[in-house]
Amino acid sequence: MRTMMVLFMMIAQTLFVYAQEEETMQELQLEQLKAREENMTEDDGQWQLYEHRRHHPLRLNMATADDLQELQLLQPWQIRNFLLYRQTFGRLLSIYELQAIPGWDVETIQRIQPFVSIRESEAGDLPFLKRFREGEGSLLLRTGKWFAAGGPSSYVRYRYKCGRQLQWGITADKDAGESFFKGVQQQGFDFYSAHLFARRVGPLQVLALGDFQVNMGQGLIQWQGMNYAFSAVLGAKKQGEVLQPYSSAGEFNFHRGIGVTMGTGKLQVTAFISYRKLSAHLQNDSAGRYFTNFITSGYHRTLSEQEAKHTVKLLTTGASLRWRHRSLQLGLNAVEYRSSIAFRPPPAVYRLFAISGKQWGNASADYAFTIRNLHLFGEFAIDQRAQTAGTAGMLCSLLPALQLAVSYRYFSKQYQSLFSSAVSQGAAPSNEEGIALRLDWQLNRCWKLQAQTDIFRFPWLRYRVDAPANGYEHLLLMTWQPSRKISWQFRYQYALKPLNGADTFAVKYPGWQQRRQWRVQWSWEMGPRFTIRQRTDFLLAGIKGVPEESGVSLWLDASFKASRRWQLNARLHIYETGSYLSRVYSYERDVLYSYSMPAFAGNAIRSYVLTRYKLANKPGRWSAELWLKYAIAVRPSGLPVPAEEGEEIPQTDLRVQLMFGLR
C-alpha cells in the first residue's frame, strides 16, 4: 500500500502542473468545521443562493447593503464604499467601473463577477398575488446510498422563486435505512417541510410562514444557518439577515411557525413564534419525566430512534430590534423557550451547568460600526441565570492588499443557549475564552498569503477533557498563481488541544493532543474543457510525549466539459492512516446542492465519477438536468472503520439526482 502511494505521488508531482480552480476558503472552512463538529447539520441554503445568483445575477445599480452582505464575498468597508460611490456618481455604466471604488481590487471584482450584473432597467416590486405567476419553479429528485442495508435515501424538493420578492416550497426527505410507507412511516417520508417567504408585502419588510431560520448578532443566543466565507478575514464575523427561508433536509436547526420584520429607514423590528416537535430519549424517575439532550441527527431507523421521535414539544418566541444609521448598526435580541418535558443535566460532571427545567431564555445586544477601512463588531449576551457571554472583533484593511481580523471571545462556563453557534472552538458558545487573528495578504500578482491563529482556554471540564485546560491552533496557506490557468497551494496546520489520556482511572487528567498537517495542492486548466487537480496530505497526530501516528492522503481529480450538455468529474483517492486519530477530512464534489466530506481513516483506494447531463433546455419553458455519482472504495485489509469512531465509508455508493426547471 505504501509503495503504491509513493509511486502515485511521484507520478503526480512530476507533471508540470498549474491551475485555475484553487481550493476555496469555503472548502477549507467546511473541513475545519467538520473536524470540530462531527455531526454537521444538512443545510444547503448558501449553495442555493449562489446557484440562483449565477442564473439571476444581483443588479448592482439597485442592490442594498443587505443584498451585498448576503453574498458573503465583500468586506463591510467595501460595501460602504460601493454605496457611497453609487450615491455620489449615480448608476454604474460598466462592471469595470468597480475598479474606481476605494478598497475594490481586481481580485474582489473577479470574485463577485459571476454573481452580479450591470442592468439599466430594473423591475419594481410586483403585486403580491402576481408574484405567484411571474417567477420560476424547480423540482429536485434525489436518491442515494443505494447499497445501504436498510434501503436507499430519498429526497424531493419543489421550490418556486420570484427574485427576492417571493419564495415558497415543499421538501420531503427519507434517510437510508428508514421505512417508507410501511412500519412507523405510514406517511411515506420521515421528514416534511414547507415554507413561504416574502419581502416587502404591505407594511411588512419580511414575512416568513412555515419553516425558517433565525440568525441574531454573532450567534451567542441564536444562529441556525451555516456561515462560511471566501476569505479568512470574512470568516471572523457572522453576518446575515435575521430571517431566512429554510428548505434543506436537516431536521433540527430551524423554526416552524411565523416570523415578520417591520419598519423602514433606520429602525426595524423582527418577531417570530415557533412550535415544533423534537426528538429526545425520555427517562422517568420519582420527579417525573425528563430528557438530557435533543437528538439532532434526524435518523429514525432503529426502534430506539423511532421511539424518541417527536417526543418533546418546544414553543419558541423571540424578537430583534435593529437600528441603523449610516455606518452604525445596533441591535437588541431576545429569545425564550418552553418545552413540554423538562431538561435535566446528565450526571457527567462536565455537564454540571447544562440547561434544566421546562423554560429557558437569552437576551443580547450587538453592534457593528464601519469607519473608512475599519469595521468593529461584537455581541454581549446573558441567559436567565444571569450568566454571560461576549465577543468583540475588528476587521481592517491596513493596505489595499493586506486585510486583518482580530477577535476576542469570553463565554462563561455556566452560560447556556439553544440553537446558537458562534465563531469558536466549540459547537456552542459556552465554557471558552480565546483570541483569534486572521490575515489575508496579496503579496503581489502571483502570491497570496492567508493565515489564522487561535489561542484558547476552557475554564471548566468538557467532553473527554476532565480538567480546565487550554490550547491553540495555527494555519498557514500560501497560494502561487502565475497565470489564470495555473495555481499551487501550500498549507500547514498545527493544533495542540487537550484530551484525556488512556489511563484507567475514573478521572483522567488531560494530555496534549497534537496534530500537524502538511498539504500541497496544484491544479492546471489544460484547456477550456479540461482541468486536473492533485492534492497530497501528510499528517502526524497523537498525544504529546507519546510516539505519534501518521496519515497520508493523495488524490488526483479531473474535470472535463465535453459539451454544453455533458460535464464529467472523476477522482482517484489513496489514503492510509494509523487510526481514526490521524483521520483526514477532504471535501468531495457531489450532485448539485449537496456536498460530501468523509473522515478518511484506515487504508483504502477510493474513486468516484460525477457526471451532469442536460437532458433538455427549452428557453422560457422548462429544462432538465441529470446528475449521477458513483463511488467505490477497496480496503486491502477488508476491515471497515469501527462504527464508534465515525460513520463507515461505504464500499460502493450511487447517488442519482434529477432537476427540472419550470418557467
Image: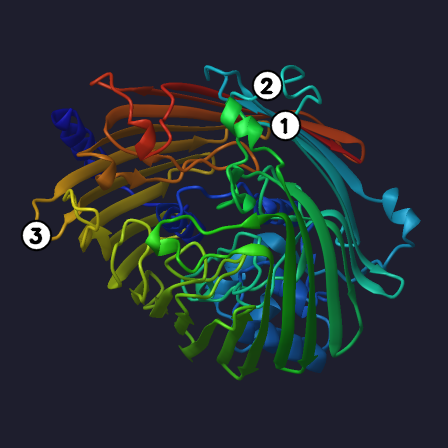
CA distance separating discs 1 and 3:
48 Å
Q: Quadrant of the C terminus?
A: top right
Q: Residue at x 31, y 56 (%)?
A: 479
- The correct choice, above or below, for 451 with respect to 564 in the image is below
Q: Quadrant of the N terminus?
A: top left
Mark 2, residue position: 179
Q: Which element type, helix, strand or loop, lies under badge 3?
A: loop
Residue 190 - label: 1
Instruction: Tell me the kind of residue under disc 2.
Output: Ser
CA distance separating discs 1 and 2:
8 Å
CA distance separating discs 3 and 2:
49 Å
193 relative position to 31: left or right: right
How far across and down, in percent of the image, does residue 656 sit?
Answer: 56, 22
How far across and down, in percent of the image, does residue 636 sit?
Answer: 21, 18
Kindly indicate whether the residue at mark 3 contacts the one at mark 1 (C-beta within 8 angstroms).
Answer: no
| Mark 2 surroundings: few (<14), some (14-19) or many (≥20) residues within 10 A | many
Which of the colour schemes (rainbow, by chain, secondary structure, one colour) is used?
A: rainbow
306 relative position to 3: left or right: right
Q: Which element type, helix, strand or loop, lies under badge 1?
A: loop
Mark 3, residue position: 545
Q: Residue at x 43, y 24 (%)?
A: 609
Kindly indicate whether the residue at mark 2 contacts the one at mark 1 (C-beta within 8 angstroms).
Answer: yes
236 relative position to 257: left or right: left
Q: Residue at x 63, y 49 (%)?
A: 49
How far across and down, in percent of the image, does residue 156 sit?
Answer: 66, 28
Instruction: Tell me the kind of residue under disc 1.
Output: Asp
Q: Which element type, helix, strand or loop, lies under badge 2?
A: loop
